[in-house]
Image: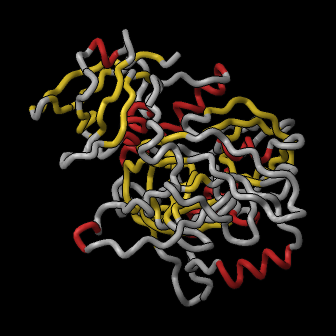
Amino acid sequence: MNANEPREQGTGGWSQFGATPPAAGGFPRRDTIAMEVPPPPPPPPSDKHRLTVAQKAVAGLALAAMAVGGGVVGAAVATSFQPEPVASSSPSAPSPVFKSASDQLTVAEVAAKVQPSVVMIQGQSGEGSGVVLSEDGLILTNNHVVVGAGQGGQMTVKFSDGKTAKATVVGTDPATDLGVIRAEGVSGLTKATLGDSDQLKVGDPVLAIGSPLGLEGSVTAGIVSALDRTLNLGDDQPQLPPGWGQQQQQSAPTTIGGAIQTDASINPGNSGGALVNAAGQLIGINTAIASQAQGGGVGFAIPVNTAKQVADQLISTGKVTHAFLGVSVTDATGDVPGALIRQVTAGSPAEQAGLKEGDLITKIGDKTVDGGDTVVGQVRGFKPGQEVKITYMRDGTTHEVTVTLSENK
């Protein structure tokens, strides 16, 4: 990795797809790309609780070209995308109930509460989702949604009541795959209620709301499957079929730490949409899926606490500052998992704390490090000036040091 802690090439590189290029997502491809991954060999029973190399292949939900014909979309949805209903349509069957410490709402009540604050973002070459942050039109979404929808002209935002408005970019942050846009000439919008992603627990019920396959206002239900995942969003870009317009511009590869994993059905088009808890509070921005089949897979969302921090900076200054450690790392190859320091930047926080080339980082704070990506993702989740405890091994002995992160220039 360089001074901004990217992974070094030669150890898997930036791509989340490893040595195998991705295939196109499910047809018809709309606003986000669900990459397929070739089926891996069955994992041994002892590895059930760890992601295999193929399972770690994470596809950014990038925008895809808009398919032609609503009938095609309907047929594809009817045959290929059959999620379980989030609420019963039978009058005799009560709606499933979400329970939390402070609220007891049905799935239908949560959906009705949140849907007005989730929008579809449309462009000449693709579509995506977004979440309303303010009554006067500030909308949070993914960087790759802005990159894709913004090609070839101005974006349009479609609200839950069917009204539309032109939109312009306020700012984007490729490092966290987040962006903020503003819908023009609007007022009185229903803004999302922000929750606290630090309070999430595995097993908590969640809803994903967005525009999969261009079907705005779609709701799927699930649970938090895991927390604190590290995502590799690469720059591999499949070719579009002839006649589908220009190729999508893909945002630069990046690594995101602290992601929320969910089994709520997420498909192309959910990018930038809302992941909410049982109280209808926004707890994540849906960003990526890992899939071995067309039509969805395991979903991942950027925690709302990270998203709020980034959005606040984009709104106030148009840019985001990131923490800087100052090491180049690669995956460890020995018996002890971790990130091997290959280089320490002169004058960096890492050098000032005494870290050296050859040290093996095994923990950052309370997070166990299983490779270089973990270091990258964790550092990007911290703020400049924050003190972080790093556990490392040198000559077979474990040491701890506290590092004060600086601002990445």
The picture places residue 65, in percent across and down from the top left corner, at 80, 58
Q: Compared with residue 120, is residue 308 higher up or lower down, i.e. above or below?
A: above
The picture places residue 182, in percent across and down from the top left corner, at 76, 35
Residue 386 or residue 105, whichever sits in front: 386
Please name the residue shown 30% across and 21% down the image. 387
What kind of colouring is applied to the model shown? secondary structure
Q: Compared with residue 219, is residue 307 higher up or lower down, i.e. above or below?
A: above
Q: Compared with residue 382, is residue 47 higher up or lower down, i.e. above or below?
A: below
Q: Quadrant of residue 102?
A: bottom left
Please name the residue shown 68% across and 53% down the image. 237
Residue 250 or residue 69, whichever sits in front: 250
Q: Quadrant of the N terminus?
A: top left
Q: Is residue 341 left or right of residue 206?
A: left
Q: Quadrant of residue 385?
A: top left
- The outermost residue toward the top is 347
The number of discs equals: 0
- The outermost residue toward the left is 397
Q: Can residue 190 be seen?
A: no
Residue 284 or residue 343, whichever sits in front: 343
Q: Can residue 117 be seen?
A: yes
The picture places residue 315, in percent across and down from the top left corner, at 66, 26
Q: Quadrant of residue 99?
A: bottom left
Please name the residue shown 82% across and 77% down the image. 72
- The outermost residue toward the front is 10
Q: Is residue 16 left or right of residue 79?
A: left
Residue 285 or residue 398, whichever sits in front: 398
The picture places residue 230, in percent across and down from the top left corner, at 42, 47
Please name the residue shown 58% across and 64% down the image. 266
Q: Compared with residue 286, is residue 304 higher up or lower down, i.e. above or below?
A: above
